[in-house]
């Protein structure tokens, strides 16, 4: 009820404020560095935002200012790092668990891409099985199980339910991603959820790991690109398996904001070419 009061109460949560200040300091330093850079230096998000601040200088209601720039950069880091890394983490765990699926992905990657070419995002059109597996990883893991907390800005009706202005909304994304009416085997890892009988990729309207509507994840396209490129490159390069003597995988999640896999070791064994087998603990 009074989130501001936490600042004045002692306890372990004070560490969050310390870390927050460290991150803010780092971004502030970056902003100064950007301002000092030569005009011909490559332009990025901070540059664009800074030029927007200058353009909107005479606009009394503009929200473009350095304080907000720092917060937006924090939002992008918060939203964009853990989600993608955790999804990839699950991908490797599921494919160690489902060895035949891993081999089928690798077979498709080998057949379609051959040995030499680097993978690009457009290749997903020619890799329906790989694409379906990655979608199934996102569906089954439901990394963001509950979307961000929202509030109705106006009264409205949704599917016959009245929502008065001010209602707090928590979108239960995991329930959509495991809805028995939308998925054939909702509780099982099944790439067939995204394939037709001829093996073509098919989308499903209930695939909403990024949520939907006006407040859909703004990083969705970036995340899809990152996930596909990293997943396909990792699977093409390594075979993933349990280390010798392992007692098996732990598939239950731990809740840490996102639904995360438990810390555990799997091996990446080099598949391609000349370097010979090499094993790395993950
Ligand atoms: C697997 C990857 C990702 C998943 C599953 C994911 C999922 C989500 C979800 C469910 C939301 C809440 C949407 C809502 O309120 O309805 C969200 C918000 C957000 N995401 Fe992502 N996200 C991912 C990657 C990224 C990336 C790569 C970025 C940016 C670089 C990003 C930035 C954000 C931001 C800034 C918000 C808050 C937007 C707002 O408040 O309107 N996300 N994301």
Image: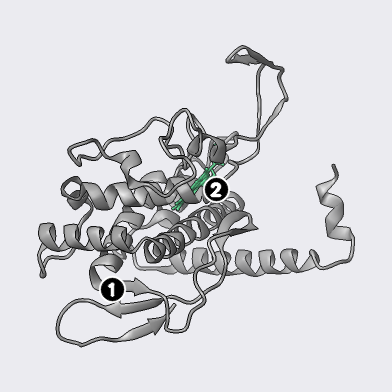
Is 142 situated left or right of 256 in this image?
A: left
Which residue shows up at 18% across the image and 61% down it?
Answer: 107
The picture quadrant where one finds residue 41 is: bottom left
Disc nearer the start of the sequence (2/1): 2
Local secondary structure at mark 2: loop
Which residue does the numbered mark 2 point to in the structure image? 144
Which residue shows up at 61% across the image and 11% down it?
Answer: 160
Which residue shows up at 66% across the image and 25% down it?
Answer: 152
Local secondary structure at mark 1: strand
**Mark 2: is the Cβ under 8 angstroms from ligand 1?**
yes
**x and y percent of residue 123 in the render?**
18, 52
Nearer the viewer's eye, disc 2 or disc 1? 1
Q: Residue 33, relative to residue 185: is it above or below?
A: below
Residue nearest the viewer, comparing 263 with 219:
263
User: Tag on residue 108?
Assistant: none
Is 166 situated left or right of 174 in this image?
A: right
The N terminus sits in image quarter: top right
**x and y percent of residue 213 in the render?**
48, 29
Q: Residues within 10 Å of mark 1 (few under 14, many from 20)?
A: some
Q: How crowded is mark 2: few (under 14 residues within 10 Å), some or many (20 or more)?
A: many
Q: Is residue 219 among the parts visible in the rendering?
A: no
Which residue does the numbered mark 1 point to in the structure image? 238
Residue nearest the viewer, comparing 16 with 271:
271
């Amino acid at each position: 009820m009074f989130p501001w009061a936490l600042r004045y109460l002692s306890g372990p949560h004070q560490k969050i404020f310390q870390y927050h200040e460290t991150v803010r300091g780092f971004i502030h330093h970056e902003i100064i560095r950007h301002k000092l850079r030569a005009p011909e230096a490559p332009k990025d998000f901070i540059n664009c935002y800074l030029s927007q601040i200058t353009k909107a200088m005479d606009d009394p209601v503009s929200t473009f200012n350095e304080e907000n720039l720092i917060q937006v950069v924090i939002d992008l880091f918060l939203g964009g790092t853990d989600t993608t890394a955790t999804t990839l983490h699950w991908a490797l765990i599921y494919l160690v668990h489902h060895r035949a699926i891993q081999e089928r992905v690798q077979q498709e990657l080998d057949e379609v891409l051959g040995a030499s070419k680097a993978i690009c995002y457009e290749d997903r059109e020619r890799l329906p099985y790989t694409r379906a597996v990655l979608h199934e990883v996102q569906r089954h893991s439901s990394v963001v199980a509950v979307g961000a907390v929202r509030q109705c800005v106006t009264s409205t009706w949704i599917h016959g339910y009245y929502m008065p202005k001010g209602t707090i909304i928590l979108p239960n994304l995991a329930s959509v991603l495991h809805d028995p009416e939308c998925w054939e085997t909702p509780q099982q890892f099944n790439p067939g959820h995204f394939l037709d009988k001829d093996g073509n990729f098919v989308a499903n309207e209930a695939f909403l790991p990024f949520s939907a509507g006006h407040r859909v994840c703004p990083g969705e396209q970036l995340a899809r690109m990152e996930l596909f490129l990293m997943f396909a490159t990792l699977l093409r390069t390594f075979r993933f398996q349990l280390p010798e003597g392992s007692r098996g995988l732990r598939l239950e999640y731990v809740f840490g904001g996102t639904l995360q896999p438990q810390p555990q070791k799997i091996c990446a064994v080099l598949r391609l070419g000349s370097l010979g087998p090499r094993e790395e603990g993950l």
